Image (tube, grey):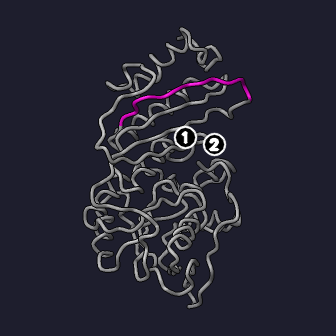
Amino acid sequence: MGNDRVTLAHGAGGKMSHELMERVLLPEFGNPYLNELHDGAQVAMSGHIAFTTDSYVVQPLFFAGGNIGKLAVCGTVNDLSMTGAVPRYITCGMIIEEGFPMKDLRTIAHTMRQMADAAGVQIVTGDTKVVEKGKADGIFINTAGIGDLIPGTHIAPQNVKPGMKVLLSGFIGDHAAAVMAGRHGLELPDYIRTDCAPLNKLTRAMLKVCPDIAVLRDPTRGGVAAVLNEIAEASGCGVLIDEDAIPIHPEVQGVCDILGFDPLYLANEGKCIAFVPAESAEDVLSAMRANVYGKDAVILGETTEDAPGQVGMRTSVGGIRIVDMPLGNIVPRIC
């Protein structure tokens, strides 16, 4: 396959489509399920499963610490993990623009394979389409995933009660800052990179020490503020967080100051928020800090009977301000 760019013929279903699969995708994604090259995959499950799907349209496609392929695998793994499931299998659908560099496609596929291996999941089926130049902004990726629900867990906002603790797994805003830096040509220290990561081993460790965790949620679009407001509204509880407890790198805060953003509303792709019974909070916090993706975990706040459905933040000077639900997509094309 001498082409150094994707052509319309690569999506036409003929010889070049076959070569694209055989020489680019199968070497990265290959496993007994996918290697059958059937219209779907037959897989073994426990009988009680979780199922999710998501699409990724980020710009730029490559940014500090990751690319669209990393987002696609980790995003689906994390969505399953937040339901209390063990991710098992994912699908991959790609819509590729004519003229897309083949080397970039290979890099994206390789990153997806690395993330799938790290999460312990297999890419078992998928689809590739090629559209005319100017119709896809490079590449769009859709992934769907299925996983086995962990027995004894029941993750639902309605389980949240007053007096629970709100835990956060680490620094916020790193992903959005990395993407914005790439988009606007801003210079950040090398350690400010996307936080994109598979969180299934972290959430499984948390549920092992406390099966009664009420809710797990990853604060992606809309950030921490959106998640807290969603849970407050669904549960009918108030949520009160402490400004001094919010972990944020000074450089990320600096990007927010320059561009006029509140870090509570920035997207994250490797963070977890948990609503936990107060008596189990310290045990869950210890389990989080024992995992590489939870080493900076904090107790962010608690749920209350006051101000049902609202989120407040206790400020550094002792006042309380309302943290509203974001009205729209503050930073577009972030995932």
Which secondary structure lies at badge 1? Answer: helix
Instruction: Report x, y in % for residue 230.
Output: 56, 67
Kindly give the residue lying farthest to the top in the view shown.
15
Instruction: Report x, y in % for residue 12.
Output: 61, 15
Which secondary structure lies at badge 2? Answer: loop
Q: Quadrant of residue 257?
A: bottom right
Considering only order in the chain, which callout, 2 or 1, is on the residue closer to the N terminus? 2
Question: Which stretch is magenta?
Answer: 122-134
Q: Residue at x 41, y 70 (%)?
A: 159
Kindly give the residue lying farthest to the bottom in the view shown.
318
Is residue 48 found inside the magenta-colored segment of the image? no
Is residue 133 found inside the magenta-colored segment of the image? yes
Viewer-proximal residue, 42 or 187? 42
Kindly give the residue lying farthest to the front in the view shown.
47
Nearer to us of marks 1 and 2 is 1
Viewer-proximal residue, 48 or 256? 48
Callout 2, which amino acid?
Answer: Pro
Viewer-proximal residue, 254 or 98? 98
Mark 1 and mark 2 in contact? Answer it, CB < 8 Å.
Answer: no
Left of 334 or right of it: where is 247?
Answer: left
Instruction: Report x, y in % for residue 36.
Output: 37, 19
Callout 1, which amino acid?
Answer: Ile
Q: Which mark is residue 68?
A: 1
Taking 306 as reference, is 222 above or below it? above
Left of 84 or right of it: where is 139?
Answer: right
Left of 150 or right of it: where is 131?
Answer: right
Query: Which residue, given by chain and number where applicable, does mark 2 sit on?
Result: 60
Taking 98 as reference, is 2 above or below it? above
